[in-house]
Image (cartoon, rainbow, N blue to C red):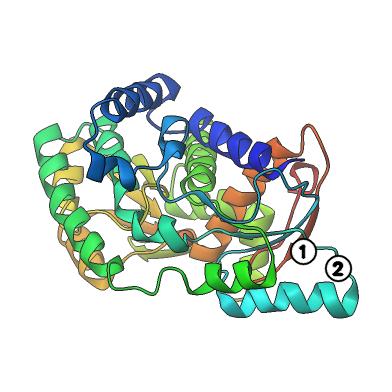
Amino acid sequence: MKLENFYKKAVAVGIARDPRGPEAVQRILDEERARSGKLTDDERAVWEPDRLFNPYADTRLLAGDPATEVRTLIVGIDMDAAEVVLAHTLNRDRGAGIDLVVSHHPQGVALAQLAEVMRVQSDMLVAHGVNIAVAEQLLDKRISEVERRVLPANHNRAVDAARLLGLPMMCLHTPADNCVNTHLAGLFEKDKPSRLKDLVDLLKGISEYRAAAGRMAGPKIVNGSENAHCGRVSVEMTGGTEGAKTIYESYAVSGVSTIVSMHISEEALENAKKAHLNVVLAGHISSDTLGLNLLFDELEREERLEFVGVSGFARTRAADR
Ligand SMILES: [Fe+2]
């Protein structure tokens, strides 16, 4: 598969699984197209043409010729310079034939823009009945925090290594997170777990979470008891990174009882406890792995690819899940 095709298909799957729905995402792309016609010279100098088809600023081709044919991918949750050198070593010493490095967490220009994809979170909150003004204002504050946090990072460290070694590299973040978010929300909607222990059992029925449990990193209830009722469940697995730490009171008022997330900061957990919400951590690396696997299932419908799993990722196909 051509690298450019692989990238565009991954974005298309992300849009199809976007919690806002494909029509809402299309409106965002249309707005971007309209904006692109009115850019000043300074703005145009740093504007990325990807924005016309890719609404996810945390997902980009980072190195390599888009026309490269790719078949064997090394995929990891975090791919830094060490993993890029590992890919090179596997090719040189073991004949691994790796022709693309895929990182889940953003690198390079995609890391620098991570905060942009957080906007989806306000739509997800509104879908659960949270007042839109509250959702947007709390999120604006959090987006500024995340912008300031990623701004000083050494964004291009791994990308520079890939470029020097002649290895194509890309990152796939929100498209994969959309896949796991939509998958789990659909699962809870269909199976309607009654109590938290039932919800955790549902998660453990998925191979990625079972494998994590075997590594002592399985799903865990961090607030609420096993026998507590789930009530209305909100899955918080997409939108770049953790959202507003003070949203939980509004969640409780809107009727949500249980949050299922990949991770939660201490401050956010304390606020969730004050709001008397149940919180289940499904697992970070396991949820990221499930999201990537669901995405790759779609990409492999046309053409089977070869995967080298590293940095927490292991390829599991739908039939084995
Ligand atoms: Fe992650």
Residue 81 percent coordinates (x, y) = 57, 77
> Does 300 sit left or right of 35 as displayed?
right
Going 49% across and 37% down the picture, which residue do you hit? Answer: 182
Residue 262 is at least partly visible in this image: no
Q: Which residue is mark 2?
A: 96
- Of 124 and 170, which appears nearest the observer? 170
Q: Alpha-carbon distance for marks 2 and 1?
A: 9 Å
Quadrant, the N terminus: top right
As helix, strand or loop, the secondary structure at mark 1 comes to: strand
Going 64% across and 43% down the picture, which residue do you hit? Answer: 294
- Of 124 and 241, which appears nearest the observer? 241
Residue 231 percent coordinates (x, y) = 34, 40
Q: Residue 216's image quarter? A: bottom right
Residue 219 percent coordinates (x, y) = 51, 62
Residue 16 percent coordinates (x, y) = 52, 28
Q: Where is 303 relative to 317, above or below?
A: above
Q: Which residue is mark 1?
A: 308
